[in-house]
Amino acid sequence: MTHALLVIDVQNDFCPGGALAVPGGDEVVAPIKAMMDQFDAVILTQDWHPAGHSSFASTHPGKSPFDLIDMPYGPQVLWPDHCVQGTEGAEFHKDLRTDADLILRKGFRPAIDSYSAFFENDRTTPTGLEGYLRTRGIEMLTLVGLATDFCVHYSAVDAATLGFDVTVRMDACRAIDLDGSLAAAEEAMREAGVRLV
Ligand code: VGL
Ligand code: ZN
């Protein structure tokens, strides 16, 4: 079976010193580097927002980072400005290997956030990744990266729901952990049939 490594959002803004730093975010780089040669394909995702993106608290007067708002597609956490297209914060961590087959950018539509590498947060707009994987004959996915409880979580659940065989390597992931979001994410991933190792 063709097995791909899907590396989620290992970008400067999610590493210590970044705008939306995930505790220990840079610790995933070394294990990911060591794993990359063991797969038939490697795909990197890159969170890639235009300035003034609707997921940024700064776009909504009176709102603060980590507030929850209602968007036309449902509730949305507001974030500090992060991964703005073309900025240093949106670049991959300098030690991440970028010799991947595909770099998939997501979150570029101003009005919709996109945690998952498969569907945006309206849960219906596809990113095109499913078609890429299927046309390459990829049936198994191992996920690593940032953050466990947001982009890794939603990507893993969508992949399993779409019928891929999905494993999350927890040792190569780190979480934001807002109000129990890590425990909830682990529960949701297990329920969807994702293997957590
Ligand atoms: C992410 C929040 C906002 C992530 C991206 O990569 O988990 N989280 N944008
Ligand atoms: Zn984002």
Image (cartoon, rainbow, N blue to C red):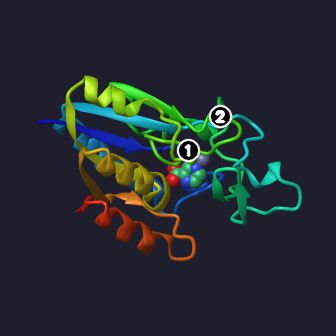
Residue 181 x/y as whole percent: 50, 70
Pointer 1: residues within 10 angstroms few (<14), some, or many (20+)? many
Q: Residue furthest left?
A: 1
> How many badges with numbers are in the image?
2
Residue 22 x/y as whole percent: 53, 60
Q: Secondary structure at mark 1?
A: loop
* Mark 1 vs ligand 2: CB below 8 Å: yes
The answer to whether 76 appears left or right of 33 in the picture is: right
Residue 14 appears in the picture as rendered = no
Whether the residues at callouts 2 and 1 have beta carbons within 8 Å, the answer is yes
Residue 65 appears in the picture as rendered = yes
* Mark 2 vs ligand 2: CB below 8 Å: no
- Quarter of the picture holding the C terminus: bottom left
Q: Depth check: give the residue in front, 155 or 146.
A: 155
Q: Secondary structure at mark 2?
A: loop
93 w.r.t. 194: above or below: above
User: Residue 109 has which mark?
Assistant: 2
> Residue 101: which quarter of the image?
top left
Pointer 2: residues within 10 angstroms few (<14), some, or many (20+)? some
